Image: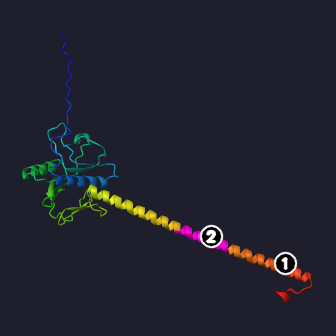
Amino acid sequence: MVKELTTDTKPEIIYPDSDGQPMADNTKQFRWIVIIKENLEILFAKVPDVFVAGDLLWYPIKDNNKTRIAPDAMVVFGRPKGDRGSYIQCKEENIAPQVVFEVLSPGNTPKEMRKKLQSYDDYGVEEYYVYDPDKINLTGYIRVGKSLRKIEEVDGWVSPRLGIRFQAAPESLEIYLPDGRKFLTPVELDQAREQAEQRAEQERQRAEQERQRAEQERQRAEQERQRAEQSGKRAEQAEQLADKLAKLLRESGIDPDQIL
């Protein structure tokens, strides 16, 4: 009797790209997610091995598609930029996001946020920031040893990984890039771009006006030079005529000094 040969093949694990949950519950939460994510993209735009994402599913455990988290924004150092359907850690050299952000909405419960904190603690996040835009309240956590610890004074705090600074303000949280520029909304960024273009155009126009003035001065100087040259020629011609007249007078036996 011939035994049928069989091979044990492990079924491929499918990691869904969506959990069916909305990115944000309201416009305020969505706006802050965009502000944080896009300004972090700008900060690391020229650094090829820093990956920034917003509302992307993160699968921290190999061959486990049930355990997943979707930070509102996350930053991964040591991974290349590029589009992803999800962040599957086992396919990313097992590098966990080092920094994550959550923006609270009225739908977030304390139990849910405690679970997220525990997950980020368990899976190796180094810095975790939670912002409540309704209460204008920022809470931060930093890894100390093997666990995340709450940052006691977050006002003025500078992220060790990102270099950004958090500043409390009466009407809103303010976040500053390492060079001192403030995190801006997409509209504010576009306005800043327009203002920069207007300043550049004004500078171009001033430079053109200066060039035109310089050209006018050059032309005036050239005209003065030509007039001086013409005056010199006329004086030379007059002197030549006087010499010729004096010569003719002397040839005629007349003393030029008695006449001139």
Q: What span is colored magenta in the figure?
A: 213-227
Residue 19's spot in the image, x, y percent? 16, 41
Whether residue 126 can be seen here: no
Query: What quarter of the picture does the N terminus occupy?
Result: top left
Q: Is residue 6 above or below residue 113?
A: above
Left of 247 or right of it: where is 182?
left
* Residue labelled with disc 2: 222
Q: Quadrant of residue 58?
A: top left
- Residue positioned 77% across, 75% down in the render: 237
Q: Quadrant of residue 11?
A: top left
Q: Nearer the viewer, residue 235 or 142?
A: 235
**Is the residue marked by circle 1 packed among few (<14), some (14-19), or many (20+) residues within 10 Å?**
few
* Residue labelled with disc 1: 244
Residue 149's spot in the image, x, y percent? 14, 57
- Residue positioned 30% across, 57% down in the render: 189
Q: Is residue 5 above or below residue 68?
A: above
- Residue positioned 16% across, 45% down in the render: 22
Q: Quadrant of residue 94?
A: top left
First along the sequence among labels 2 and 1: 2
Residue 53's spot in the image, x, y percent? 25, 48
Give amino acid for label 1.
Answer: Lys
**Is the residue marked by circle 2 packed among few (<14), some (14-19), or many (20+) residues within 10 Å?**
few
